Amino acid sequence: MNLSHITIVLDQVRHPDNLGSALRAMKNTGLSRISLCAAQTRDFDRARVLATDAIDLLPRMRLFETLPQAVAHGTLIAGMTSRQLGHRPTMWLDQFVELADRETASGGEVVIVFGNERRGLSNAELDVCHLAVNIPTAPEKSSINLAQSVMLVAHALFSKSHREQQERYCPSEVPVSLEALCAPAGLVQALYDRAFPLLLEADFLNPQSPGLIFAELKRLLERARPTKREVELLLSALKHLERKKRR
């Protein structure tokens, strides 16, 4: 995902607060190209307040009178909408992110169009786009605030572009299934409390600094992310060793 090949277009934006918040969302997610089409506000001073550290994007913002002009450079143009359209290609946001990834990787230009706060994108405006994109929402409320919509889309693109970096912070060898994460901390602590005196009495731990080796054992168990059943098995094994020792 090449974020420098992605342009956000706000069509007929009405409120400077939404413009400022959209700029901030873009700055948070590494996007830098924004265009306004037939803007209904020129209160850029108010937008600057909400943009905070993203005010450097304001001078680089491009202004257009018509939507075809704003998207003319795009090789893949997506219109964001909460409506379900049966007459034209429509996809979910995660599907679009994969498509945008391939498009920018090949040198293409992706343009994402957001409608204004009052009515979103009309059918005629969506006809300027190659496809329509939906953000999944609860059926009780399908429309999303403009700035929030920009943030959701921008973050999805940003996450895709940084997938490898994310995997470095969350290595694949660490289990992330619910089953692997279900051992309660209290149960694991009970295992530590039972194991420490037993290992100390068995001369496995150095009485002068018993915590050093035991800390390594704890780190080993933390990396393994044992299930509740696995911790209970280890506790049972310790109980049997204690019983055997007393005999």
Image (tube, helix red, strand yellow):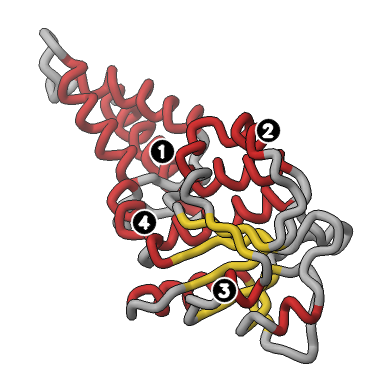
Q: Which residue is mark 2?
A: 46
Per the model, the C-alpha gap separating discs 4 and 3 is: 26 Å
Q: Which residue is mark 1?
A: 236
Residue 228 - label? none
Nearer the viewer's eye, disc 2 or disc 1? 2
- With 190 as the anchor, is 156 left or right in this view? right
Above or below 47: residue 101: below
| Extreme residue toward the bottom, this view | 87
Above or below 11: residue 100: below
Q: In terms of sequence position, does the residue under pointer 2 or pointer 1 come before the other?
A: 2
Is residue 13 visible in this depiction of the protein?
yes
Q: Which type of secondary structure does the marked residue at label 3 adopt?
A: loop
Assess disc 2: are there few (<14), some (14-19) or many (≥20) residues with their C-alpha within 10 Å of its C-alpha: some
- With 78 as the anchor, is 32 left or right in this view? left
Which kind of residue does numbered mark 4 sit on? Answer: His
Above or below 175: residue 2: below
Toward which corner of the image does residue 130 lie, by quadrant?
bottom right
Which kind of residue does numbered mark 1 sit on? Answer: Ser
Q: Which residue is mark 3?
A: 71
Mark 2 touching mark 3, by CB under 8 A?
A: no
Q: Which type of secondary structure does the marked residue at label 2 adopt?
A: helix
